[in-house]
């Protein structure tokens, strides 16, 4: 971890790998060795909790500190990140911490995301949890995304879960997306599910879009399927349009 100081204040925190060549640009460089991971995490956490995180977001010193915490190979990092996603923390911090839970914290991170999916009071944060689950390498993350696509009370969250499921692809994702088209009570969610079909590999998505365009009872959903078929540039879509137009 690299800290840049100006006027006795930390103004930037960066993470670099062991094989990264460093150029301090002629500035004094002090290397500190023997720092315990728990002490490092505790020190970094003071910057995450400091003023400016919500206002400055990615540009804040706190965001650099959050990234550095997430990349610590120590359980104290999991505990710190868990403290950042508590409901009393700001939404910006909860969203950023959720991302790192998925991207870097393995099973411990997944457990926290599963808890957030069920308990975070903000639909915007829960929508971001669907993205965090999509970048997790844990197999059970897909299970939670499917649960959110089915059961979250917010149509926005259900739609986001469907979108990120489509990026994961796979038979289970397809089943959840088509299930939402058939069974979700919200037309906007159905339309988002149609869009999710358009994001699947063409051999999976195009036949499903044709099926929706032919058979779905909701005219808005059929129209959405037709639109995304038109954007696909797939010869099967062209054949379908020719069939419809020559009836």
Image: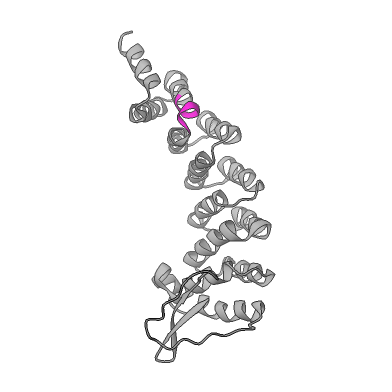
Query: What is the quadrant of residue 149 in the picture?
Result: top right
Q: Give the residue displayed 31% in from the left and 9% down from the top.
A: 246
Q: Which SS type dominates the magenta stretch?
A: helix
Query: What is the quadrant of residue 102 in the picture?
Result: bottom right
- Which residue, as the protein is rendered here, is positioned at the far bottom? 8
Q: Is residue 198 above or below residue 64?
A: above
Left/right of residue 78 with respect to residue 162 in the rendered view: right
Q: Is residue 51 above or below residue 146?
A: below
- Which residue, as the protein is rendered here, is positioned at the far top? 247
Write the start and end of the magenta stretch as one range.
Answer: 201-206
Left/right of residue 140 with respect to residue 246 in the rendered view: right
The residue closer to the viewer here, 140 or 137, is: 137
Q: Is residue 207 above or below residue 18?
A: above
In the rendered image, residue 32, in percent from the top left (x then y), is placed at: 57, 85
In the rendered image, residue 81, in percent from the top left (x then y), is placed at: 60, 68
Is 40 one of the magenta-colored residues?
no
Numbered label tally: 0
In the rendered image, residue 99, in percent from the top left (x then y), is placed at: 53, 59
Q: Is residue 208 above or below residue 73?
A: above
The residue closer to the viewer here, 117 or 137, is: 137
Q: Give the residue displayed 60% in from the left and 41% down from the top.
A: 146
């Amino acid at each position: 971890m690299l800290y840049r100081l100006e006027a006795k204040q930390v103004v930037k925190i960066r993470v670099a790998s062991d094989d990264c060549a460093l150029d301090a640009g002629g500035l004094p460089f002090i290397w500190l060795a023997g720092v315990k991971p728990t002490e490092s995490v505790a020190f970094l956490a003071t910057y995450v909790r400091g003023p400016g995180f919500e206002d400055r977001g990615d540009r804040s010193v706190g965001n650099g500190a959050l990234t550095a915490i997430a990349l610590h190979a120590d359980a104290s990092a999991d505990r710190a990140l868990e403290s950042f996603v508590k409901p009393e923390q700001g939404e910006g911090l909860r969203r950023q911490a959720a991302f790192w839970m998925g991207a870097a914290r393995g099973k411990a991170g997944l457990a926290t995301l599963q808890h957030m999916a069920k308990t975070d009071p903000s639909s915007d944060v829960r929508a971001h949890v669907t993205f965090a689950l999509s970048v997790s390498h844990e197999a059970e993350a897909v299970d939670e995304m499917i649960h959110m696509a089915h059961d979250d009370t917010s149509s926005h969250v259900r739609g986001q879960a469907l979108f990120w499921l489509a990026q994961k692809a796979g038979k289970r994702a397809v089943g959840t997306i088509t299930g939402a088209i058939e069974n979700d009570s919200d037309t906007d969610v159905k339309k988002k599910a149609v869009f999710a079909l358009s994001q699947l590999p063409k051999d999976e998505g195009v036949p499903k879009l044709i099926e929706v365009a032919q058979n779905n009872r909701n005219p808005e959903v059929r129209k959405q399927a037709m639109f995304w078929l038109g954007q696909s540039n797939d010869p099967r879509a062209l054949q379908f349009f020719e069939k419809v137009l020559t009836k």
